[in-house]
Image (cartoon, rainbow, N blue to C red):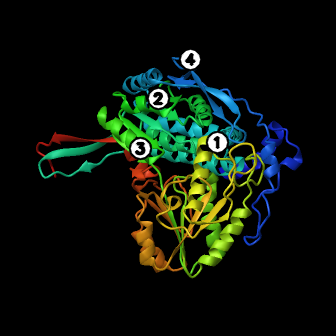
């Protein structure tokens, strides 16, 4: 119902707030016909003349102890529009002193405040009210998210915002169902376990799904009764700063959730090293994750949950429906401009259907609608910033230089902003950088395999293990692959299916711990055993 409501609100909000002409809102839906090739990207003109979102950016300060405040230094940094490279707003830049202020507020709120002491039902009602406010303000939030990150507005409004409010409600429902056990002992003792909030949680979120990752982090932590200091990504701070305001409107006490914006070497390192932080959770690159583990160990040995990089295999078996497989593989890689940690970025295709698959994958990429993310029907907006843009283009050049066949794309699109043509490589080998490294962009690498044993070995040969996709009509093949692949999630005949109740996390270099579902609660709970002698017990 939330998704349907968001869909109904789109046209009214855009026409009311953005003052576009009717022709600006193109018809919805993707271009049909996988085999049809277009000679150029029909939306290129809109890239040069992007719309101006008519929303006010009011939340740009740090949020500490229930109030928006300037940074101690008074410094700010710009957040940019990926469509143009222009500045959207200047945001307060936190450093170590600000982190200390935020942690002190969270510490006091946990040690002395009402949040961990109120009933779990009362905590759940705050979260339920927050979800209602997210639904009420979904259009404004979706515009901020699209503007700051470059993702299509329709994706933010129709997919991400409903998923966010659903996840908040999921954990609101869990708040009063967290309990321990009564444990039988061999001796005459009564033994019970108590699940207690862990304390002050430090959380760092990435730029690719800013508000979605905000919800994945704060919802289980708050449901368990913890307090939080959350650092946004410096590229995309706006939606989290807006959302924390709504959470306090919902009744969250001061100091329970503090949101700061800043850079990793300053604000991030200070948060990870702080002796009054009891827990860390991070989503981002593997290299940064290693650094966070080191800082946690060197400080107070705080536990760390990490959701890190991936190089996920998408395996197309010889019995696959090729048209469906092409579409699913396209979605697995290109969704969110390819900026997904779990993107199906190694497309393994059986040799008997390889050539057909490559031709249709090329045609689908050429038909992908790229342009201003505020145009209806756009599938791909710009990359998040100039650094990511240049990195992707370097990988594309590497693919060509290493001998892969460039089937489609390979260049920037337009002269303004950070748009990249949907790119497809064939004849990719496992030792090429485009098959090994996490590109985090719209670059599909298609590899050929001969049999199941070979593809299992090659798929598991990566240091990453976040996700995998299997496309087959044979249940035995699906079972064999899903059990053999070393990945935290295996999608069979689907991809990027996320649900509030389904855990997500990786093997190997893709991280440790799980987020979402009941598993996500354990990240924010301590288990205490309480043992009491029994005298003259009627039973044991």
Dot 4: element:
loop
Mark 1: few/some/many CA within 10 Å (<14, 14-19, 20+): many
Left or right relative to 298: residue 365: right
**Which dot marks residue 149?**
1
The answer to the question of whether label 4 and label 2 lie on touching residues, with beta carbons closer than 8 A, is: no
Answer with mark 3 or mark 4, whichever residue precedes in sequence: 4
Whether residue 270 is situated above or below residue 190 in the rendered picture? above
Q: Between marks 4 and 2, how big is the CA–CA gap?
A: 14 Å
Local SS, label 1: helix
Q: CA distance from mark 3 to mark 1?
A: 22 Å
Extreme residue toward the top, this view: 73
Find disc 3 in the rendering and name its residue: 289
| Residue 437 makes an appearance in the image | yes
Residue 289 percent across, percent down from the top left: 41, 44
**Which residue matches tag 2?**
267
Q: Earlier in the sequence, mark 4 or mark 1?
A: 4
How much space separates mark 3 and mark 4, taking CA atoms? 29 Å
Image point (52%, 29%), residue name: 260
Q: Earlier in the sequence, mark 1 or mark 2?
A: 1
Task: Tell which of 191 and 167 is nearer to you.
Answer: 167
In three-dimensional space, the C-alpha distance between marks 3 and 2, rounded to whole angstroms, equals: 15 Å
Q: Is residue 452 left or right of residue 367?
A: left
Up the image or down, 176 lies above or below 241; here it is below
Q: Marks 2 and 1: in contact by CB < 8 Å?
A: no
Residue 288 x/y as whole percent: 43, 42
Residues packed near mark 3 inside 10 Å, few (<14), some (14 to 19) or many (20 plus): many
Residue 74 numbered mark, or none: 4
Residue 496 seen in this snapshot: no
């Amino acid at each position: 119902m939330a998704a349907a409501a968001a869909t109904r609100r789109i046209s009214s909000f855009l026409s009311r707030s953005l003052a576009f002409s009717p022709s600006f809102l193109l018809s919805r839906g993707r271009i049909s016909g996988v085999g049809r090739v277009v000679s150029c990207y029909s939306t290129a003109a809109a890239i040069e003349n992007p719309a101006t979102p008519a929303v006010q950016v009011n939340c740009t300060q740090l949020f500490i102890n229930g109030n928006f405040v300037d940074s101690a230094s008074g410094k700010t940094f710009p957040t940019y529009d990926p469509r143009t490279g222009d500045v959207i707003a200047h945001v307060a830049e936190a450093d170590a002193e600000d982190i200390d202020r935020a942690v002190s507020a969270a510490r006091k709120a946990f040690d002395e405040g009402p949040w961990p002491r109120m009933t779990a039902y009362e905590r759940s009602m705050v979260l339920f009210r927050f979800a209602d406010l997210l639904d009420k303000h979904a259009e404004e939030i979706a515009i901020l998210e699209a503007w700051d990150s470059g993702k299509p507005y329709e994706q933010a409004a129709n997919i991400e915002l409903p998923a966010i409010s659903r996840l908040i409600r999921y954990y609101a429902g869990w708040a009063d169902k967290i309990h321990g056990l009564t444990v039988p002992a061999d001796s005459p003792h009564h033994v019970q376990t108590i699940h207690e909030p862990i304390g002050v949680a430090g959380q760092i979120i990435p730029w690719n799904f800013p508000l979605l990752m905000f919800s994945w982090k704060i919802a289980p932590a708050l449901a368990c009764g913890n307090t939080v200091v959350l650092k946004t990504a410096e590229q995309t701070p706006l939606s989290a700063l807006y959302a924390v305001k709504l959470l306090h409107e919902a009744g969250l006490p001061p100091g329970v959730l503090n949101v700061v914006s800043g850079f990793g070497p300053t604000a991030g390192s200070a948060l990870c090293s702080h002796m009054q932080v009891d827990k860390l959770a991070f989503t981002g690159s593997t290299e940064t994750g290693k650094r966070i583990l080191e800082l946690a160990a060197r400080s107070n040995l705080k536990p760390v949950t990490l959701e890190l990089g991936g190089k996920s295999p998408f395996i197309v078996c010889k019995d696959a429906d090729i048209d469906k497989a092409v579409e699913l593989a396209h979605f697995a890689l290109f969704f969110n401009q390819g900026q997904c940690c779990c993107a199906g970025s190694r497309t393994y295709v059986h040799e008997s259907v390889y050539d057909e698959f490559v031709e249709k994958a090329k045609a689908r990429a050429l038909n992908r609608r790229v342009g201003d993310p505020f145009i209806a029907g756009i599938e791909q907006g710009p990359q998040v910033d100039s650094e990511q843009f240049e990195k992707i283009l370097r990988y594309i050049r590497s693919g060509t230089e290493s001998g892969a066949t460039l089937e489609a794309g390979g260049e920037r699109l337009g002269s303004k902003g950070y748009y990249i043509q949907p790119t497809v490589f064939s004849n990719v080998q496992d030792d090429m950088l485009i098959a090994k490294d996490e590109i985090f962009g719209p670059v599909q690498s298609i590899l050929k395999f001969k049999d199941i044993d070979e593809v299992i070995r090659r798929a598991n040969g990566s240091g990453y293990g976040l996700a995998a996709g299997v496309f087959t009509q044979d249940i035995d093949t699906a079972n064999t692959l899903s059990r053999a692949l070393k990945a935290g999630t295996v999608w069979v005949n689907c991809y990027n299916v996320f649900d509030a109740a389904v855990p997500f996390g990786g093997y190997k270099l893709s991280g440790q711990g799980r987020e979402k579902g009941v598993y996500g609660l354990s990240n924010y709970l301590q288990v205490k055993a309480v043992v009491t002698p029994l005298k003259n017990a009627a039973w044991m």
